[in-house]
Amino acid sequence: MKRVCFVLPSLAGGGAERVAVQVLSALDVSRWDRSMYLFKREGPYLADLPKSVRLASSTSGSRVGRLIELRRFIRETRPDLVVSFLSYFTVLAAARTAGVGVRVVFVLGTPMSAFLSDADYHWKAASHRTLFSLVTRAGYNLADAIATTSRGVSEDLMQHFGVRESVIKVVHNPIDFAALTNASAEPLEPADERAWKHPAIVSAGRLAEAKNYPLLIEAMALLRRRVPAARLFILGQGDQEARLRQQIASLGLADAVRLCGFQRNPWKYIARADVFALTSRYEGFGNVLVEAMACGVPVVVTRSPGPLEIVRDNVDGVIVPEHTAAAVAAALETVLTDDGRRASMAAAAKEASRRFALPTIAGQYDSWFSELVA
């Protein structure tokens, strides 16, 4: 039996964390001795990790301390494969200095060139971006293999960071259809249920600069001129919340846009929507798009690498090429005001989402991991 260890900063409520738990849980237990190492033992997805997965965590608050403790864990458990979701360079350094011959895999869901331009992070200064770019180029070329969630992320690595195509494999993120179906049937929070009206638009994700919620809210102001009854429900939390509330108030949208906070079960909202909207500046994949499609909801999404591999324009959703409020509002109006088109898109979306089923994706990881440790 081979040993595999997934390493993450925590199991906070993000897409990468949920995917890591889903994939590790779904690996064949007759073939893999599974463990997970966290730099902080916290996050809502801890409850989803099976008891059969060994869980360990750091006690240090410093980067160096975390590296030393992870290196000790690797030396003691001697995994054949260490799979890093985030914190790539700390994991790489710990694995390489452990001296036990472990192979290192990065799972990357973001186009790094876009990530380096993200205002949420500390490299606003050109010198910081340059330094991180150099470290990224060196570090990614020292990994044994890299899984990317889309071809767009792979191409970005090759074109901007010199990563060899031979070490990259595209593996899309999975959807647990059984869990999604059960969760989507749960009732809404009472206050949100009282506020719910159709046509309903739902969006979900961190309230962060990269998700570009100001664009969606501005589009909502334009849409309301043509579809006065439309309502927008935004699921998520983040440091942009105060700014978004101010924008909602200034545009007179207090009765039309509702911030619902972080929802451990976003699917009960998404499944009731008439359309799901995502206006991110960039997406390496877009888990929530596939989840919306699996709920039988058509999507409207701004153009970026990940969504282009998920959504078929004007078949199961609308891809908006221009990141402008007018273009987003027009796309939303098109879907919301044509019942026949919306129904057709909903059916196509649900069918198309099946290719991302958890057993299929977990099987791809299982086979690839087996090749890497053979």
Image: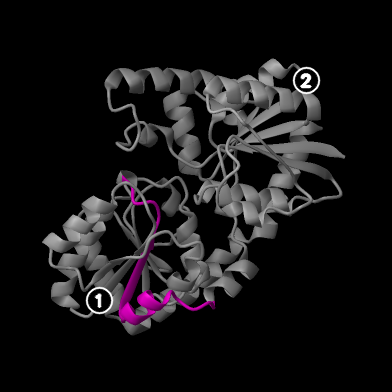
Q: Which residues are magenta?
A: 185-208
Quadrant for the C terminus in the image: top right
Q: Position of residue 288 (x, y in %)?
A: 46, 59
- Which of the 4 quarters of the picture holds residue 274? bottom left
Tell me the element at label 2. Answer: loop
- Residue in the foreground of this view, choosing between 185 and 237: 237
The residue indicated by pointer 1 is 230
Closer to the camera in the image, 318 or 257: 257
**For residue 141, what is the image quadrant?**
top right
**Residue occupying image coordinates x 66% and y 27%:** 70
Q: Is residue 249 left or right of residue 125?
A: left
In the foreground, 303 or 222: 222
Residue type at numbered disc 2: Val
Q: CA distance from mark 1 to mark 2?
A: 58 Å
- Give the numbered dot on residue 112: none
> Where 303 sits versus 253, above or below?
above
Question: Which residue occupies 74% across, 41% down?
Answer: 35
Q: Is residue 173 visible?
A: no
Residue 188 placement (x, y as % from top left): 45, 76
Question: Up-down: is 49 above or below 33?
Answer: below
> Badge 2 local density, few (<14 within 10 Å), some, or many (20+)?
some
- Name the residue located 56 percent from the left edge and 19 percent from the top edge: 64
Query: Is 237 a magenta residue?
Result: no
Task: Give the amino acid at mark 1.
Answer: Ala
Q: How many other residues sit within 10 Å of disc 1, few (<14), some (14-19) or many (≥20)?
A: many
In the image: residue 81, left or right of residue 193: right
In the depicted view, which residue is nearer to us: 74 or 47?
47
| Residue 81, image x, y percentages | 73, 32
Decide if residue 177 is on the left or right side of residue 160: right
